[in-house]
């Protein structure tokens, strides 16, 4: 049986179905649903399994279910990284133990997936697609989390949305910062900017974008003007990697459709304000060049983490120069 994710988030009722499959690319939503399940079953013992260990020895899960007695805690089972390989075992569990709470978590499952089809058609089970959040969904999360806060203007809401990049995990982290910092429940714009490092992040994002567009003059100027916080070096590498991976996706998708449609398929989506720069960047990069920079960022991350005395500031700036030069290379 199919359920909408927002119904699960709003109510505990449908979670009374004993076996659920959560699938899709939205890791943040799946984490939220896991936390909701845990909160709804505070007295239960949570058991975690990976699909591969169950397939190797399905006795481990059957033994756990069989060992439940009236004198034990209720047990809730989470199974990660699920795909069609585990379907027959799940069918067997559904037939023999329809009172056991089991929650399966998977990445993207195509419509032709056998396990997805089974859960969608079964009256005993539930399935929830966890697709990427859109701006409307992110806005609702903010309004719900910050309900009752003074100063929650459209300007502040938009600032939080843009800073989250429509990523629920990042959004939840930022909202926790806001709740912790503004304990008087009065949000001030300037303090929020400082708390979330908005200006620092915006400056680096501008530098990153100019380099990816191959704009030498702007990159050189921003390298002089931008403060590189050495404590945030891994974060900077993550921002570069995220953009490069989105460019790679756009390039791959554009082999089958036009660039506009290809960009619309990217998950998480490209924020509307970023699209003009992103369009230019897609024309500057190919998969070979992207792979080269991704390898550099990977090596640089290892170097930074393994050597605390290294000058991270210089390394990040050198990487930006390399990105700009490669963007212009044929």
Image (spheres, grey):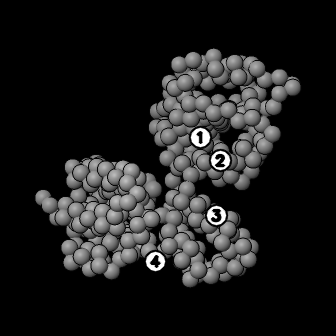
Compared to residue 235, the image places residue 196 above or below, namely below
Q: Earlier in the sequence, mark 1 or mark 2?
A: 1
Q: Please identify the quadrant where the N terminus is shown.
A: top right
Residue 226 shows which numbered tag? none
- Residue at label 2? 33
Q: Are marks 3 and 4 in contact (CB under 8 Å)?
A: no
Q: Which residue is mark 3?
A: 176
State the separation of the CA atoms marked 2 and 4.
32 Å
Identify the residue at image location x=43%, y=61%: 235
Q: Is residue 76 left or right of residue 279?
A: right
| Mark closer to the chain start, 3 or 4 | 3
- Mark 4 lies on a secondary structure that is helix
Instruction: Give the percent coordinates (x, y) of residue 260.
Output: 33, 61
Question: Which of labels 4 and 1 is toward the front?
Answer: 4
Quadrant in which the C terminus appears: bottom left
Q: Depth check: 185 or 268 in front? A: 185
Residue 319 showing in the rendered view: yes
- Residue 65 percent across, percent down from the top left: 72, 23
Residue at 63% of width from left, 70% of height from top? Answer: 178
CA gap, disc 1 and disc 2: 9 Å
The image quarter containing residue 121 is top right
SS at circle 1 = strand
Q: Secondary structure at mark 3?
A: helix
Marks 3 and 2, how far apart at CA? 17 Å
Residue under label 4: 199
Crowdedness of circle 2 by 10 Å Cα count: few (<14), some, many (20+)?
some
Q: Which one is closest to the eye, mark 1 or mark 3?
A: 3
């Amino acid at each position: 049986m199919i359920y909408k994710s927002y119904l699960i988030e709003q109510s505990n009722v449908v979670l009374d179905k004993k076996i659920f499959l959560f699938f899709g690319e939205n890791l943040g939503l799946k984490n939220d649903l896991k936390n909701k399940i845990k909160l709804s079953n505070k007295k239960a013992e949570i058991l975690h399994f990976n699909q591969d260990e169950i397939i190797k020895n399905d006795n481990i899960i059957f033994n756990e279910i069989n060992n439940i007695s009236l004198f034990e805690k209720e047990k809730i089972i989470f199974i990660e990284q699920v795909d069609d390989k585990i379907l027959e075992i799940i069918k067997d569990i559904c037939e023999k133990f329809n009172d056991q709470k089991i929650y399966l978590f998977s990445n993207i499952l195509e419509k032709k997936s056998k396990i997805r089809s089974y859960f969608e058609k079964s009256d005993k089970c539930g399935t929830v697609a966890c697709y990427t959040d859109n701006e409307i969904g992110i806005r609702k999360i903010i309004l719900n989390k910050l309900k009752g806060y003074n100063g929650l203007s459209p300007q502040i809401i938009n600032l939080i949305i843009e800073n989250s990049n429509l990523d629920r995990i990042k959004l939840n982290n930022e909202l926790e910062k806001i709740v912790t910092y503004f304990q008087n429940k009065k949000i001030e714009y300037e303090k929020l900017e400082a708390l979330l490092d908005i200006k620092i992040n915006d400056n680096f994002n501008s530098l990153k974008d100019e380099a990816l567009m191959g704009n030498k003059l702007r990159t050189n100027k921003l390298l002089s003007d931008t403060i590189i916080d050495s404590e945030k070096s891994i974060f900077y590498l993550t921002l570069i990697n995220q953009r490069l991976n989105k460019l790679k996706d756009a390039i791959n998708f554009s082999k089958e459709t036009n660039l506009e449609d290809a960009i619309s398929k990217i998950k998480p989506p490209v924020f509307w304000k970023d699209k003009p720069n992103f369009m230019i960047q897609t024309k500057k990069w190919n998969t070979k060049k992207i792979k080269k920079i991704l390898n550099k960022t990977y090596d640089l991350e290892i170097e930074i983490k393994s050597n605390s005395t290294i000058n991270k500031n210089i390394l990040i700036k050198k990487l930006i120069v390399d990105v700009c030069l490669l963007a212009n290379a044929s």
